[in-house]
Amino acid sequence: MEQVDVLIIGAGAAGLFCGSRAARRGRNVRVIDHSKKPAEKIRISGGGRCNFTNLETEASRFLSQNPHFAKSALARYTPWDFCDLMAAHNLTWHEKTLGQLFCDQKSGAVIQMLLDELETAGGHLSLETEVRGNIRAEDGFQIETSAGPIHCESLVIATGGLSIPKIGATSFAYDLAARFGHEIVPTRPALVPMTFTDHYHDAFSALSGVSIPVEAYAENGPGFVENLLFTHRGLSGPSVLQVSSYWHEREAVTFDLMPGQDPLNWLKVAKETAPKQTLAQLFATLYPTRFADYFVGELGHDRAARLAALSNKDLDLIAQTLHAWTLRPAGTEGWRTAEVTAGGVATDALSSRTMESKLQPGLYFIGECVDVTGWLGGYNFQWAWASAAAAAEAV
C-alpha cells in the first residue's frame, strides 16, 4: 500500500494548486484523477484564453448559503498573489473588462505552470486513476484505486461539480461528503444560457447572433450591466449567464433595455423632434435592425406607425417595457453548457479557514464542489486558488 501524507482527488485548478503548495511545505503529496488529461476546465476557459482571476474579487460576488464563508480564504490569497505566481513563470496577462484577467499565453500555459509547480515542489500526479469502492477512515484514510491502495493522513476532495460532463464531471464529491454526514445544498447549473418555448423560441431563434447591451435581473439577485445574446435556443451572453446563477425554475427574468437612461424622456423628445419617424426607425438608432423590427411587434405596434400617432399612454407603456422587459424562461441548457455548479457541500460543517470537515478530521473539500459559486469573469478560478491555498496550509 502506498503511504502519502496528502492525497488529493481531482487534478483540476484547485487540486493541482493545493498539491503544489502542500508539497512545498514538505508534505508527501499525490494528486489523482480519473481523466486522461489534467485541468480540462482551465483548458476551455475563456475560449482557451483562460480568464484566470478577477481583480474585483470580494465575497459579495459569490453565491452561498453562508455569504461570509468565502471571506477568510479570499482575503488570504488574492488575485495579485496568483499574478505574482504567473509572473514568476514569465506569463503575462491583460485586463479585458470588469476586472477580468486573461493569460496572454493562453490556457495551456497556465496548466503547464501548475504542473511544473507540482513537480518542482516534489508532488506526484497520477492520471487515469479511479477510486474504487468506499473510502475508509482508519487512522487517516484508506483509498482503493485502479493503481492500487493508498493510505493518507489528509484527504482533499477537489473533483469539482456537475457542470460540463463531457470533460469528466461527476457527483463524486457530493456522494463522498454525504457518506461522511455532510449536507449537500441542492445543486443546479449556473452561468448557463436560458431556453424558451412557444413563440419566444421561434422569435429568438430568428434573432440568433444579435447582441444588445442590457441590465439583467433575476427575481432575487443583483443587476448585471452586460450584453444579451439571442441564440437558436433562447438567450445567452454575459448578462444572462450572470443572472442564471440566481434564477430558479418558473421564475421571471427582467431586462432593462436602456440601462442608465430615461426611456420615457427619450421617446418624448423623439416624438417632438421627429414625429414622422416610425418606432422601428427610432429603435434602429439604438439597436440592431433585426431586434428593432422584432421589438416593435413585441410591443404590439405596427412597424409603419409613426411617432406622431402614439399617445402619451402608448409612450408610457413602451417606456415601461424598455425599462423592464420581463420574460419567463422555460429552463436552461443544463449541465452540458453550464460553466459551474451552484450549491454543493454545505459550508456550515467546513472550516472557513482551512476547508477541513468539522465532521471528519483530515478530510477537506475545495473548489467548485463547495457551496461557493462566483460570478462570471474569473471569480470561480480565484475561489479555486484561494480555497486550495487555505487547505494546503493545513493538510
Image: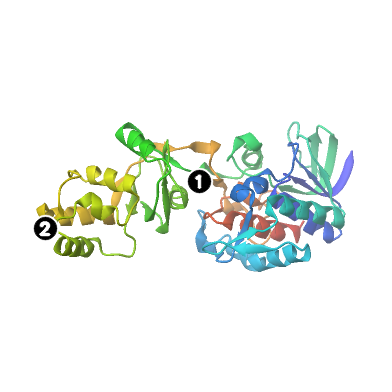
Above or below residue 89? Residue 338 is above
Lower position in the chain sequence, tag 1 or tag 2 = 1
Q: What colouring does the structure picture have?
A: rainbow
Few, some or many C-alpha atoms within 10 Å of disc 2 (few <14, some 14-19, many ≥20)? few
Question: Residue 217: image x %, image y %?
Answer: 37, 54
Few, some or many C-alpha atoms within 10 Å of disc 1 (few <14, some 14-19, many ≥20)? many
Per the image, label 2 sits on a secondary structure element best described as helix
* Left or right: 233 in relation to 51: left
Identify the residue at horizontal 41%, vertical 59% (top origin).
Answer: 225
Quadrant location, the C terminus: bottom right
Q: Amino acid at mark 1?
A: Ala
Give the numbered dot on residue 299: none
Q: Nearer the viewer, residue 144 or 339?
A: 339
Q: Amino acid at mark 2?
A: Asn
CA distance separating discs 1 and 2: 41 Å
Question: Residue 25: image x %, image y %?
Answer: 83, 61
Identify the residue at horizontal 29%, vertical 50% (top origin).
Answer: 325
Quadrant location, the N terminus: top right
Question: Residue 328: image x %, image y %?
Answer: 33, 42
Question: Residue 105: image x %, image y %?
Answer: 70, 56
Location of mark 1 (residue): 190
Residue 316 appears in the rendering: yes
Identify the residue at horizontal 59%, vertical 57% (top origin).
Answer: 378
Q: Nearer the viewer, residue 200 or 59?
A: 200
Per the image, label 1 sits on a secondary structure element best described as strand
Give the numbered dot on residue 312: 2
> How many numbered marks have been drawn onto this rendered protein structure?
2
